[in-house]
Image (cartoon, rainbow, N blue to C red):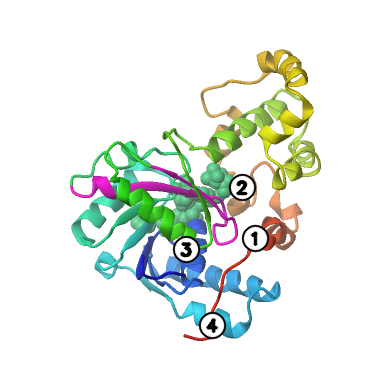
């Protein structure tokens, strides 16, 4: 890790993404401080952080001494003034614009040294994120990761109309130094690249289920055992060039008029959220998680990504 670029990173939000980012930055020798809302959430994040490193040791990617060495780089706080000397801050709070705005107001009041305020938002564009800011609007950028970012190399970066170009190059350099694969969008759009693709697929997957074509488990079987593994070694544009665009033309003509283009949140998601069936975290979503092996699921979440692990983790400082 070239620490010339960044000495201290702040992470606001101690959930799935924030804690995984902390594993990444602490694992690259960077002094990392996480801001938690309360002691319970701090403890939960510390437990998750330790579990990420236990998995890395179990995969024989690092040893216990290296894991202990990385853990030394992580600290927690409940106060913004502990972030005042951060060079970069990842904003990883809940995907609600008003909450993110509150966080940026706190950052503007406390963190004068920060060179980049990096939102991990799944969809909000920077101009909406920074809309209430008065001082550091030019330092806000989206650095959207995929879960879990300490294992998934790809990040997509998007700027706003006021973002200083130096902030983009700084964020790109920091993410490259963190052994990530950052892509800078030419033009920003809600959901960037990855989530626009993923949610176009998700909208059609929901349509297939809601229109009675197949059940969720069958759609998941299709995704896991048909074309998705292909895209771990060739790209979609490569694939369709390979198959011939004349064929592609004919198939587009047949399928495109029938694809779903709903603009609202589909009923099958809205009704579950309304009834509190939020998925694994409440025990029920599209699946009844009491009937599934959750430890096996967590193993399967990480399995495709161990091959990307390439950190140089020192044995000792
Ligand atoms: N879960 C995922 O697969 C991915 C999520 N994201 C994005 O990451 C961000 C966080 O999502 P998750 O980690 O999944 O959510 P999460 O619910 O696991 O964590 C959210 C965190 O925000 C904290 N928080 C809420 N209000 C706060 C406040 N006012 N000040 C400080 N902390 C506050 C909560 O305590 C919690 O630790 C969202 O913007 C989401 O769109 C991005 C990529 C993937
Ligand atoms: O899939 C991911 O890890 C990211 O693209 C996300 O932003 C999350 O999936 C998010 O869309 C919530 O499902």
Q: What whole-number distance in Å separates the C-alpha atoms at marks 3 and 2?
A: 35 Å
Q: What whole-number distance in Å separates the C-alpha atoms at marks 2 and 4?
A: 33 Å
Q: Are marks 2 and 1 in contact (CB under 8 Å)?
A: no
- Label 4 element class: helix
Query: Marks 1 and 4: which is nearer the front?
Result: 1
Q: Earlier in the sequence, mark 4 or mark 3?
A: 4
Check if residue 281 falls in the magenta segment.
no
Q: Earlier in the sequence, mark 3 or mark 2?
A: 3
Region rendered in magenta: 135-158
Residue 92 is at least partly visible in this image: no
Quarter assignment of residue 149: bottom right
Q: What whole-number distance in Å separates the C-alpha atoms at marks 4 and 3?
A: 21 Å
Query: Marks 3 and 1: which is nearer the front?
Result: 3
- Label 3 element class: helix
- Which residue is identified by label 4? 68
Q: Does 28 appear above or below 256?
A: below
- Which residue is identified by label 3? 177
Q: Is residue 12 left or right of residue 247?
A: left
Quarter assignment of residue 165: top left
Q: Earlier in the sequence, mark 3 or mark 1?
A: 3
Q: Is the CB of the residue bearing disc 1 within 8 angstroms of ligand 2?
A: no
- Label 1 element class: helix
Q: Does 21 appear above or below 242?
A: below
Which residue is located at x 33 percent, y 37 percent? 128
Q: Does 282 appear above or below 40?
A: above
Q: Nearer the viewer, residue 143 or 11?
A: 143
- Label 2 Cα crowd, 10 Å radius (few <14 / some 14-19 / many 20+): some
Query: Marks 3 and 2: which is nearer the front?
Result: 3
Image coordinates of residue 275 in percent, x first then y, are: 56, 39
Check if residue 152 falls in the magenta segment.
yes
- Which residue is identified by label 2? 279
- Residue 308: which numbered mark, if any? 1
């Amino acid at each position: 890790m070239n620490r010339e670029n960044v000495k201290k990173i702040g992470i606001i939000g101690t959930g799935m993404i924030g804690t995984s980012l902390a594993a990444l930055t602490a694992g690259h020798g960077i002094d990392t401080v996480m801001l938690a809302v309360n002691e319970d959430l701090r403890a939960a994040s510390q437990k998750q952080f330790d579990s990420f490193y236990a998995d890395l040791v179990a995969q024989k990617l690092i040893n216990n001494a290296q894991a202990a060495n990385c853990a030394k780089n992580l600290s927690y706080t409940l106060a913004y003034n502990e972030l005042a000397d951060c060079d970069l801050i990842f904003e990883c709070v809940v995907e609600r614009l008003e909450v993110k705005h509150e966080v940026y107001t706190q950052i503007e009041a406390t963190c004068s040294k920060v060179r980049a305020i990096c939102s991990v938002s799944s969809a909000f564009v920077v101009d909406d994120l920074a809309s209430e800011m008065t001082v550091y609007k030019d330092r806000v950028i989206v650095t959207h990761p995929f879960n879990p970012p300490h294992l998934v190399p790809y990040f997509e970066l998007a700027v706003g109309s006021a973002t200083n170009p130096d902030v983009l190059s700084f964020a790109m350099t920091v993410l490259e130094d963190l052994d990530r694969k950052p892509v800078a969008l030419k033009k920003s759009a809600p959901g960037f690249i990855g989530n626009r693709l993923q949610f176009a697929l998700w909208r059609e997957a929901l349509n297939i289920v809601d229109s009675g074509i197949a059940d969720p488990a069958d759609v998941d079987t299709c995704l896991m055992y048909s074309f998705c593994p292909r895209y771990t070694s060739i790209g979609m544009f490569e694939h369709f060039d390979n198959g011939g665009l004349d064929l592609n033309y004919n198939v587009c003509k047949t399928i495109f008029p029938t694809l779903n283009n709903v603009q609202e949140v589909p009923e099958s998601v809205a009704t579950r959220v309304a009834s509190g069936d939020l998925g694994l975290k409440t025990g029920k979503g599209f699946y009844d998680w009491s009937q599934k092996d959750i430890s096996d699921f967590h193993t399967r979440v990480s399995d495709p990504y161990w091959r990307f692990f390439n950190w140089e983790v020192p044995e000792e400082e």
